[in-house]
């Protein structure tokens, strides 16, 4: 393996709680509630696609594109108020150490995330310099499970898809990796991420040795 591509939310940092709180506030303003269980379905799902789910759960119909854009902007403002408070203490266990061990072994590293807030989060966590390339929601048009984000990552790193391992916590993300001809390590539960080549609970449970054995 010549390269590791990491999803950001749920793999390097747990931002799901902040997405949840911001979407919940939006839902509450429209007069309905939004559960943590529903939030699970939004992992790996783009901002506008997430909004569509929330509107359908709240049985809200007839919103214009301009109104939807305003709602997404409002949610993102609240989300940014929270992520701007993040510190490196919120990096998930083992994440920084594993990415660093890849670099030390001469393996290239990239971020492949749907989030348009990726640059803010990497800066807050002081991780930007750990990655040779960053491909995020600002440079991708087709959402996961389309492999675009990871294929662009491979191109940016100068490697072929077969040389890449993707680390993902979302079902759509694992599918995107497989659709791109890459190996996928699931971060989470085996039941949910059954299409991954291997599933671990977190990067603290993964090693270079396991990478070589994939
Ligand atoms: C990640 C998260 C999703 C989020 C998406 C877009 O994939 O798992 O929950 O909706 O990024 O994030 P953004 O920061 O652009 O709103
Ligand atoms: Mg994720």
Image: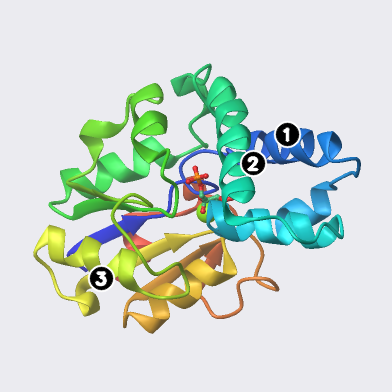
Position in image of residue 116 (x %, y %): 41, 44
- Which residue is more in the foreground, 66 or 143? 66
102 w.r.t. 74: above or below: below
Tell me which colouring the rendered structure shows.
Answer: rainbow
Q: Which residue is mark 3?
A: 151
Q: Residues within 10 Å of mark 2 (few under 14, many from 20)?
A: some
Q: Which mark is residue 212?
A: none
Position in image of residue 171 (x %, y %): 58, 70
Residue 43 visible in the shown view: no
- Which residue is more in the foreground, 3 or 41? 41
Q: Quadrant of residue 141?
A: bottom left
How far is the residue under mark 1 from the one under mark 2?
14 Å
Q: Which mark is residue 21?
A: 1
Q: Is mark 3 within 8 Å of ligand 1?
A: no
How far is the residue under mark 1 from the one under mark 3?
32 Å
- SS state under label 1: helix
- Which residue is more in the foreground, 212 or 20? 20
Q: Residue at x 38, y 29 (%)?
A: 120
Position in image of residue 192 (x %, y %): 68, 71
> Closer to the N terminus: mark 3 or mark 2?
2
* Quadrant occupied by the C terminus: bottom left
Residue 104 visible in the shown view: yes
* Quadrant occupied by the N terminus: bottom left
Q: Which residue is mark 2?
A: 71
Q: Residue at x 85, y 36 (%)?
A: 28
């Amino acid at each position: 393996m010549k390269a590791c591509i990491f999803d950001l939310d749920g793999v390097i940092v747990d931002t799901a709680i902040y997405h949840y709180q911001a979407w919940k506030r939006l839902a509450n303003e429209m007069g309905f509630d939004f559960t943590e269980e529903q939030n699970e379905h939004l992992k790996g799902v783009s901002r506008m696609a997430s909004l569509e789910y929330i509107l359908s759960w709240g049985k809200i119909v007839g919103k214009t594109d301009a109104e939807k854009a305003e709602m997404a902007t409002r949610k993102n403002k609240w989300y940014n108020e929270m992520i701007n408070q993040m510190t490196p203490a919120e990096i998930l266990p083992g994440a920084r150490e594993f990415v660093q061990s890849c670099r030390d072994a001469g393996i290239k590293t990239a971020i492949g995330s749907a989030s348009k807030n990726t640059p803010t989060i990497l800066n807050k966590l002081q991780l930007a310099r750990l990655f040779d390339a960053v491909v995020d929601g600002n440079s991708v048009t087709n959402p996961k499970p389309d492999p675009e984000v990871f294929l662009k990552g491979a191109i940016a790193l100068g490697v072929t898809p077969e040389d890449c391992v993707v680390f993902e916590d979302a079902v759509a993300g694992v599918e995107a990796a497989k659709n791109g001809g890459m190996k996928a390590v699931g971060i989470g539960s085996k039941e949910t991420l059954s299409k991954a080549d291997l599933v671990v609970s977190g990067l603290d449970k993964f090693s270079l040795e396991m990478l070589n054995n994939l």
